[in-house]
Amino acid sequence: MVHSFGIGGLLLLVTAWTLRAGETVNSIGMTMVSIPAGHFKMGQEKRNLDYGWHCSVEIDQGADWDEQPVREIEITKPFEMLATEVTNAQYELFEPTHRKKKGPGKLISQEDDAAVVNINWDDAARYCQWLSQKEGRHYRLPTEAEWEYACRAGTTTYYHYGDVLPDKYQQMNANFLQQMNLYVPDQSKAPPYYAFTDKISLLEKRHAPNAWSLYDMAGNAQEWCLDWYAPYDPKVTKDPLGRVGNSRVVRGGSFANWGRLLRSANRTSMLPSVRSVHTGFRVVAGEDLGDIEKPVAFPEFAPPKEVKAYIDPSYDPHTPLFVGPVDRVKIPPGSTGPLYSAHNHDAGVACLPNGDVFAIWYTTVLEGGCELAVASSRLQAGSKDWSDAGPFFDTADGNDHAPALFVDGDTIYHFNLTDNWNGSFVRTSTDNGHTWSLFRPFAEDRPYAQPNESTIKTHDGRILATLDGANEASIVMESKDAGNHWTRLTDDSEKTHDPGTTGKAIAGIHTGMVELKGGTLFALGRIDNAGRLATYHYKLPLSLSADGGRTWSYSISDLPAITSGQRMTMKRLKEGPILLCSFTDRLLREKAEEVGKVGLNTVKDLKSKVRTDSERDGLIVSDGRGGEFKGYGLYAALSFDEGKTWPVKRLVLPENPPATLLGTDGSVQKVDARHAEPNGYLASAQGADGRIHLISSRNYYVFNLAWLTQGTTYQQPPKK
């Protein structure tokens, strides 16, 4: 016997004899399964302590830090859950043009009875509101606890199928999984539940249901839950609900993802405005939980207010000052979440109105790993010691790359690529970084564009921010309203940006940018491609824009090029000169482009690609006493003529340097009076009192203009 449901010209068929006890069918053909009240253990004890670049059955069974502590949870009220994920046909009764406008592409199936994807949390919440009105009963997203309770269906194993997934269960495709081939160089040796395929099927009911007749609770599309994501509160054991956070919980794992993300206890989260081809949802009919079910509007950033920044009264800017290197990454060895001791890199730094120096960076095992999160620490005004690192921002199982900071008056801006590279977002703080707004879109339409640390405010009040784009170029985003709305000024689709030509983007990535006194924008970038490096004579590419950032002219600078594993920083100092901090020599001899795509700490034979001492050119730098010598590594340079020349250069080293210092990932670097740090990602900020704060991937330095110019013809006169 077949029931038919006709809505808007679409015929939905439901076979009545397939219904089981406790199942009902609503007016649009959704099979709803009755879930009883009860108890279960939420979370998982067995931890994953190996986030290396390989996969195995054992790793796929391991939990992340946020799945603990395991708690006995009571679900006090029964509810009904949709037996499958919401399908394309069911969703298009609400939004008829979804597949036409937001379809997942040719490599993913889009049949009527396939799971709908490219749905953000707000879309799903509005669908539930529509369905509630249509059906005359309350529909919503499941809470995270309801979801895991229903998924387990009485089981305590890693998956509701058992401790391993069925053979050929999990569809894998490198187009949808970053660095898949690094983790699985030989597909024949992968665990048997992986099925490598050219096209992904999202058809419902391809696999057996769980014990409560729910399908696709492991894999297919990952599913939005109602909760805001936060660590578990061990004191809450009855109907827990995450009411505070900046990302929403996602459960179940998706196609083209590692098996451990499909475990019943695994937690993922995404910013609620993000749409992904991996993400859909299912609904429950149950208790109305109030405002948490409703979409939350983007915050409106208020115009920054001018503040009187803290200035240390004991500091004399005319006396040369240099401190460092100081190891600023205080994470205990062996840490595997929420902070990771293995790889800490790509920092941003800001001088706050209260005099604190604030640093953020990503913390992970692998640069492409889904464990990657953002950490922070603080050097309080008047203190000599950085605080221990702490968690700052994380979308669970999301690769939250490229954090950056910018300060304007009382407002601190935090930019971040997030949710496995599904666009960049921005949030603000007006209390010196202690609390933060929710995120707004920043460059949401550019999935892989990494924010840089070269955000500036121009003479006409615009905020300009740069991001890495395509074709080894950088794009420029503009906001005229304090960061509430952004316009992309540049076009990085052009394949080349050769010296002597003009184009629509900045040449190079990991850009440093300043505004010159006449309003022209001045930018330097990094190039990894061997052919382009040669075109620029192994110098930093220089880009100039006279029209506010829309078009650029390209030329060769006098400054040595850098490659993967290195990033410059450039700032306009309050005293007037432009400061550049960079490295005297390229780190890599070869394969810089390939290394840049996968991450420095992912390359097994990295040492063979690093240039030896004999291959490095060095740079003539000041000794601070009126003489010069050839130095190597991290240097600071000053331009007094708007970037035309850089007559002052010094190695960023104390007068009596240590024999060694810790480099990226805690590697031991040999240093001496002529050799500073050879690589790292740099970020800098200048405090209200003129002190310059510079951080590399590992170390912290502070110096001033008097130290930079010491012993040169540009030396500042002593204070009268």
Image: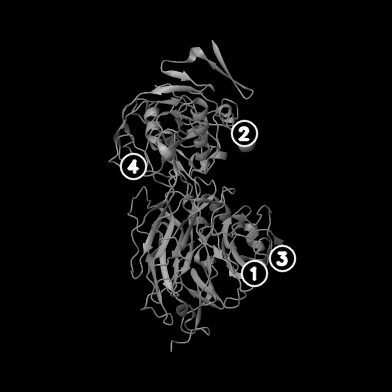
Mark 2 or mark 3, whichever is nearer to me? 2
Q: Where is residue 469 in the image (x, y as percent from the top left)?
A: 60, 54
Is residue 123 rendered to the left or right of residue 657?
right
Residue 208 visible in this rendered orientation of the protein: no
Q: Mark 2 points at which residue?
A: 99
Q: What element carries label 4?
A: loop
Asked where in the image residue 52 lies, by quadrant, the reply is top left
**Looking at the picture, does residue 528 appear above or below residue 189?**
below
For marks 4 and 1, give the CA distance: 51 Å
For marks 4 and 2, give the CA distance: 36 Å
Q: Quadrant of the C terminus?
A: bottom left
Is residue 360 rendered to the left or right of residue 383?
right
Q: Nearer the viewer, residue 657 or 276?
A: 276
Numbered tag placed on residue 500 in the rendering: 3
Q: What element carries label 2?
A: helix
Is residue 69 rendered to the left or right of residue 248?
left
**Looking at the picture, does residue 282 appear above or below residue 19?**
below
Type of the residue with mark 1? Thr
Type of the residue with mark 2? Arg
Of the image marks 4 and 1, the number of the one nearer the N terminus: 4
